[in-house]
Amino acid sequence: MHGADTTWSLNDDALAPGQTARFRLRGADGPLDGFVVNVGGVLHAYVNRCPHAGTPLDLTRAGFLGEDGRHIVCSRHGAVFTPETGLCVEGPCPGASLERLPVARDGRRMVVSCPT
């Protein structure tokens, strides 16, 4: 992507289950880095920021999913999040959640937008 926009989209079949993709949006306060994860054919989008440390989840390794491919894992301190809800279930911030971004269908496109 050449610049940030307030929405980002991809074809509904662009990511297979268990795959993730990064993107950047233009938020009210500046650039907003995010990612999507395909869980069983359903896309979930989150801000790429750990609620524990405020750092990107993929800061020290490529990707967002842990070795088992079933959880989102922060590469800095090992916080483990459920991909369907963004809830931290293990690590330094249990009960905290990733910030969810809205995902909507537009024909065959899945559109992620900045929170309002």
Image (tube, rainbow, N blue to C red):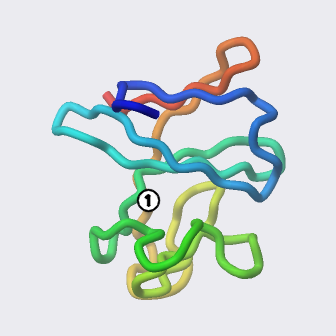
Name the one closer to the observer, 65 or 97. 65
Rendered location of residue 111, percent (x, y): 57, 25
Rendered location of residue 114, percent (x, y): 37, 32
Name the one closer to the observer, 20 or 80. 20
Q: Residue visible at 40% across and 41% down?
A: 24
Secondary structure at badge 1 equals loop
The three-letter amino acid code for the residue at tag 1 is Leu
In the image, residue 55 above or below residue 43: below
Quadrant placement of the C terminus:
top left
- Crowding at dot 1, Cα within 10 Å, few <14 / some 14-19 / many 20+, comes out as many
In the image, residue 79 above or below residue 102: below
Q: Is residue 81 visible?
A: no
Q: Position of 34 compared to 84: left or right? A: left
Residue 7 picture quarter: top left
Rendered location of residue 18, percent (x, y): 77, 58
Q: Position of 68 compared to 6: left or right? A: right
Rendered location of residue 91, percent (x, y): 48, 87
The total of numbered circles placed on residues is 1
Farthest residue toward the left? Answer: 29
Q: Is residue 65 visible?
A: yes
Residue with the mark numbered 1: 98
Q: Residue visible at 41% across and 83% down?
A: 76
In the image, residue 71 above or below residue 23: below
Q: Residue visible at 26% across and 41% down?
A: 31
Q: Residue visible at 60% across and 49% down?
A: 21
Farthest residue toward the front? Answer: 2
Residue 92 picture quarter: bottom left
